[in-house]
Image: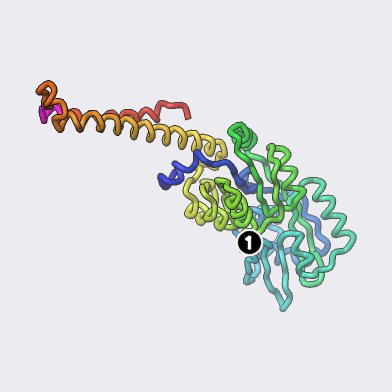
Amino acid sequence: LIKNAESLELAKKIDTIILDKTGTITEGKPKVQELIWLDNSAKDILFTIENNSHHPLAKSITDFLGDEVNLLHLNVEDISGKGLKSNYNNKNYYVGKVGWIDELNIQKTNEVNQLIDSFSNKNYTISFFGDDEKVLALIGISDQIKSTSIEAIQSFHEKGIEVWMVTGDNEFSGNAIAKQVGIDHVVANALPNDKMDIIKDLQKKGKVVAMVGDGINDSAALAQADVSIAMGNGSDIAIDVAEITLIGGDLTKIDHAINLSKQTVKTIHQNLFWAFIYNIIGIPIAAGVLYPFNGFLLDPMLAGAAMALSSVSVVTNSLFLKYKKI
């Protein structure tokens, strides 16, 4: 779904594509592979906090916990790029990226460090659940790569397009996915503003950057990119900000959009060329430029028909786009 002519015309000039990971390269349907409790006295709190979030990782955790827990009445605060925070019985609870543990000065025991290393070696996306004093649980989550992602990224490389993956996920998980799909440039642990800053830096180098994402956290980067592309199964704000939406979230459609852009601009140039040639020849004849030489005057009815034929030829050439290989 292409919202404006500018994005369609600019797509042919794309030389750098930045991809989000979850929901863009992967299916966006993560599943909890391991949840290890260090203190299981706060299961209800974890379930309630995650139940108040619309993030795909949150849903995977609530699905994993299932019917074993009760829903509490809590106010949940979304800390952008880090996780979720809540308060219960005058005690703060946190769910989010493991890097947030150090920022919150929560104690990390040797057992916690060993579990983080173990999860990292398994290429899990890692979340922690803790309070102000200690880590209560560690959660290892994985997501399947879309069947079309490798094919799409290979086609980008064949076009000479530089491909980046910028993800808020940890470095181990990000590099593992990048290796499987053939991406060389990886930025992990990226906050929403980091994605936008990377695009700005590339644009300063003269790059024409396309950003592909699906989440609320991608909206700032999508707004900054030269061409913004959202997954059709992504968040409403991402779709609203983006100029191009991929119905179904198939990355190979980006290759189709680039090819369509090339064919469209080529057709525009053909139409302009022939329209100019047609008018350069036709207008002087209609004005009687040949009359002094051979007495020829163009009949007004023929001139009108010729003008209509000019429009028909342009429209017909444009309609041939339907039959060209995209």
Q: Quadrant of residue 87?
A: bottom right
In the rendered image, the vertical position of residue 294 relative to residue 7, given as above or below: above
Residue 165: percent from left, percent from top:
66, 46
User: Tell me, what colour scheme is on the image?
Assistant: rainbow
Q: Is residue 324 left or right of residue 153?
A: left
Provide residue 99's location: percent of width, then percent of height: 76, 61
| Towards the viewer: 39 or 203 | 203
Looking at the image, which residue is at 46% across and 37% down?
261
Q: Amino acid at mark 1?
A: Asn
Which residue is depicted at the point 68% across and 54% down? 168
Q: Give the residues drawn in magenta, as a range.
A: 299-303
158 is within the stretch colored magenta: no
Most foreground residue, 175 or 69: 175
Q: Residue furthest right?
A: 110
Q: Position of residue 129 (x, y in %)?
A: 75, 63
Q: Is 316 displayed left or right of 6 in the figure?
A: left
Residue 1 visible, this orientation: no
Residue 90 shows up from this direction: yes
Pick whichever, 304 or 211, lies toward us. 304
**Image x and y of residue 203, in percent:** 58, 51
Q: Secondary structure at mark 1?
A: helix
Q: Quadrant of residue 111?
A: bottom right
Mark 1 burial class by Cα count in 10 Å: few <14, some 14-19, many 20+: some
Above or below: residue 216 compared with residue 15: below
- To which quarter of the image does residue 42 belong? bottom right
The residue wearing badge 1 is 51
| Residue ID at (50%, 37%) | 258
Residue 300 magenta-highlighted:
yes
